[in-house]
Image (cartoon, rainbow, N blue to C red):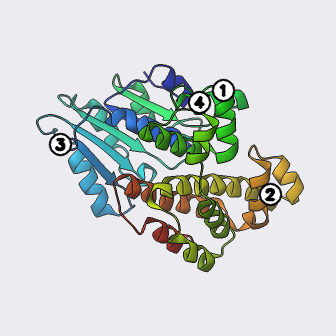
Amino acid sequence: MATYTYLTWARHPTVRRLTWVCGPEPALVGAVVAAHREGGTPEQAVTLFADGKAAAERSIWDLLLSYPPPGGRRAVVHGAERLKSTGLVADLAAARGMDAAVTVFVSADHGFASDGDSLAPHLAALKAARDGQIIRCCAPSSAEARAALVASWWPGAGLPLGRELLARCGSLQVAWQACDQARRAGLEPTPARLALVCPQEASGELADLLVAGERGRAMALAAAVPREAVGALIGLLDYRLALAGELGDLLRAGQDQREAVAGVRGDRFVCGKVAPHARAYDWRRVRRLRRVLARADAAWRAGAPAGVVETVVALWT
C-alpha cells in the first residue's frame, strides 16, 4: 500500500519499514522522518548522506542491506535523489527478516521520479511492497487548511492563532520551527506567547541579503543569529528559495515581475522582495541549494553548536 500526499498520510500516520519521502515542504518531510524515529533509541538511529560518489553509495547500501543489530535500526538517507543504484530498493523491499530495519529515503525532488508515464522503477517497487510507502509533502491548497495544519502543531492553538502564526512566519517550515520551539518551552498558545517564537529580525534580514546575492553582508550578520533561531532561518531560506525558483521560471518565460508575482502562490510581500533576484535561480541552482539547506538542517538538529549559518552563507553560490 502506498501513500501519495502528506495530508493523506497524516490522517493515519503509519510507520512502515520502507518509506520514500519527497516534496517542497521540508517541515512536512521532517514530520514524516520524526514519526519514523519516534520511540527509537539513540543507538538505533542512523543518519546517512548520499553525495553522488560511488564509495559513499556503496557504504549506504552495504548498511541498508545488512541485517539490523539487536534492538533494530532506524536509518534516514538524505539526498536519496542522488542514489545511482536505485535497483537495490527493490532488493531491500524483497528482503526477509528485516522487520526491525526501518529506512526512510529523503529526496530533495519536489515530486516522484518518473519513467515515462509511470513511476520510476524503485518507487513502483516501494508502492507495491507490503511494508513500503511513498509520500509527497506539499502544502495544502487552501489557506484554511494550511492554518489548521499549523494550529495542529501547537496543542491548544485554534485557527485564528494558526492564521496569525503562518502570516508572521511566511512559510510552513518557519511556522513548524516556531511551534516546535513553543512546545519544547511549554508555552501556552496565546498571541503574547506567539511573539516569543516568531523569527527574529536578524534571521529575516540575513535571508533577504543571501537571496539577493550579498554574501558579504549576510556573513557579517551570521554571528547575530542565535543557535535557537537557526532552524527558523533555514526555513526562511527554503521558502525564499522555492519562490525564487518559481518566479525565475516565469520571468525566463517572458513574464514581467508583476505578472510573475501574481502567478505564484505565496506571500506577496516576500515575493516582491525575491522577484528582482529570481532570474539567477534556475532549477539546477535551486536543487543544489536545497541540498545545502538539507545538510545544514540535519547538522543543526544533530546538535552542531556553531558554524551552521556561516556554512550556509559560504555555500550559497
Which quarter of the image is occupied by the C terminus? Answer: bottom right
Extreme residue in the front direction:
192
Judging by the rendered image, the residue that carries numbered circle 1 is 159
Residue type at tag 1: Leu
Q: Which of marks 3 and 1 is in front?
A: 1
User: Which residue: 46% across, 19% down?
Assistant: 12
**215 lies above or below 263:** below
Name the element at disc 3: loop
Name the element at disc 4: helix
Whether residue 13 is visible to the viewer of this picture, yes or no, is yes
The reply to whether dot 1 and dot 4 touch (C-beta < 8 Å) is yes
Which numbered dot is residue 272?
A: 2
Whether residue 20 is visible to the viewer of this picture, yes or no, is no
Q: Earlier in the sequence, mark 1 or mark 2?
A: 1
**130 lies above or below 49:** above
Residue 183 image point, x, y percent: 46, 37
